[in-house]
Image (cartoon, rainbow, N blue to C red):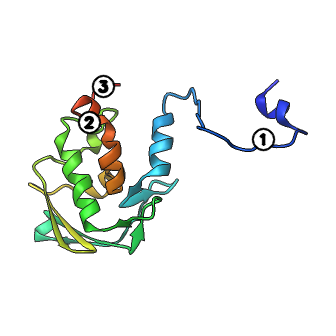
Amino acid sequence: MSVLQRLAGRARPVPRGTLRVVDPNPLNWLYVTYNTVEELVRVTRQGKVRPAAMRAYRWRDGGRTLQVILHANQFADGTRLDSGSVHRAFTEQFRWESPHPPGTQFNIDRRSAVEVVDDRTVRLHLPEQDGLVLGKLRATHVMSERFWRDLGFGYSLHGTGEGHW
């Protein structure tokens, strides 16, 4: 008998303490990540890249610079998502040798540079043209300053955000 079947017909308990979610799926970290962080783009079920935190984009410099304009947005903790947030996301991602071990094809070239133009505009300067970079933005997770200060993918505990799991 499942937990849901046992709880059927009972009054719902009042939540107390810490909630622990147990999901045996080896990809559960993906579901948690994709539903708790912001990304510049999302991908539809049909595989089309669509703006999310990003309102619009424009290619510049012969396709070597991607200019991103952000929505006026905020994180789940109520803090603002702005150009500084996106800059921090790229800076942190570029620290890792392989930010996306399940698929290095999602990695944006670490030689890229990020420029904050204003509060809502960021430019990603690529070392060479990369027609897949819009899709790669799906794997660039934009977090609040609180996340980086308090959790930061384990930096404070392990000195890095990769390889300790």
Q: Is residue 35 above or below residue 9?
A: below
Q: How far apart are marks 3 and 2 (CA)?
A: 12 Å
Q: Where is residue 125 in the image (x, y as percent from the top left)?
A: 13, 61
Residue furthest to the front in view is 17
| Residue 99 seen | yes
Q: Name the element at disc 2.
A: helix
Provide the residue designation for mark 2: 156
Q: How far apart are marks 2 and 1 (CA)?
A: 36 Å
Residue at x-position 49% and y-position 28%: 26
Q: Position of residue 165 (x, y in %)?
A: 35, 25
Q: In this view, does 28 lie above or below 24?
A: below
- Taking depth in this image into account, of 45 and 91 the one nearest to the observer is 91
- Taking depth in this image into account, of 143 and 18 the one nearest to the observer is 18
Mark with earlier residue (3, 2): 2
**Which three-letter amino acid code belongs to the residue tagged 1?**
Pro
- Taking depth in this image into account, of 87 and 139 the one nearest to the observer is 87
Residue at x-position 26% and y-position 36%: 156
Q: In this view, does 96 lie to the left or right of 11?
A: left
Q: Name the element at disc 1.
A: loop
| Residue 161 seen | no
**Which three-letter amino acid code belongs to the residue tagged 3?**
His
Q: Residue 164 carries which label?
A: 3
Provide the residue designation for mark 1: 13
Quarter the N terminus occupies: top right
